[in-house]
Image: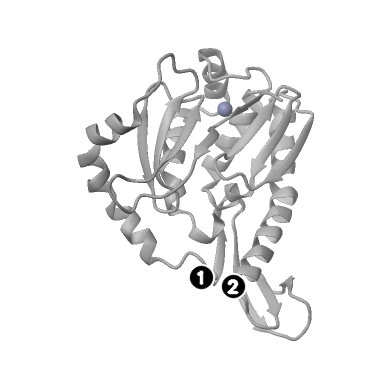
Amino acid sequence: MLQCAMITTIMESSQVTIWPPLYTVKKSTRAKQVRLSIHPQKGLTIHLPQHTRRPVDIDALLIEKKAWILKHSALLEQASKKDPMSLPTSLLLSAIDETWQVDHMQNCAKPTLFAAAGSRLVIMDKDLNIERAIRLLHLWLKKKAVQQLIPWLTELSLRHQLPFNNAAVRNQKTQWGSCSTSKNIQLNYKILFLPKALAEHILLHELSHIQHLNHSRAFWRLLSTLDPHCHEHNKALKTIESELPAWLY
Ligand SMILES: [Zn+2]
């Protein structure tokens, strides 16, 4: 199935710790030229345009960009010191104006998560296993996103007369959302953690693919009529991921 996603195709995965560095290569429909990025959780990524005519010499590229990579690898140092599996004490879901306190309690019953009064999420487990608690949080976030993001997408779709076929929520590693040729939209539940304007920008981006399944000028023209700050928002999305909690990845 053809898809137009904000970022596509992970080819190889690892993290920068030593020289020569380990890296991830992504083919992107948005990349016009080869670009590097460093992310605390994802490490070094080499973004390649979706359709490159000649093969890219990665070794030569790494040598050429060595100074930049070493300068920015401080970010990765920081990330490796952070415990990615620590349980959050609260969830700030800016996109929907909700904050939830997270309580982890020891209990001999089956691991459970439930929402209690006062915007409290209670996770009960016999041995306070962090990994299990995080899995329960991910399941809760997915349900929350279905309840909140899909009605929001539907409302925008009706308002702008851009009807989609079906919508679903997932936790894609590299995409905020996608839209297929069959007009099926998928949204990432990490969107819940974004500022409202950026969350809406993603929904409008995917809805614009209902008319244009590419990132052509016509696509951007349509998106800019729906979101006049679309270029600014698109730029902000490229850097905001590093501010999201590590346990979400
Ligand atoms: Zn797109």
Above or below: residue 110 compared with residue 4: below
Name the spot of residue 169 as percent of width and height, x first: 70, 45
Q: Out of 230 and 235, give the one closest to the viewer.
A: 235
| Residue most extreme to the left | 67
Mark 1 vs 2: CB contact within 8 A: yes
Q: Is mark 2 within 8 Å of ligand 1?
A: no
Q: Which mark is residue 86?
A: 1
Q: Is residue 118 visible?
A: no
Name the spot of residue 52 as percent of width and height, x first: 44, 18
Name the spot of residue 77 as percent of width and height, x first: 32, 59
- Residue at (36% x, 66% y) in the render: 81
- Residue at (69% x, 50% y) in the render: 145
N-terminal label among 1 and 2: 1
- Determine crowd level at label 1: few under 14, some 14-19, many 20+ residues with C-alpha closer than 10 A: some
- Residue at (68% x, 75% y) in the render: 122
Q: Amino acid at mark 1?
A: Ser
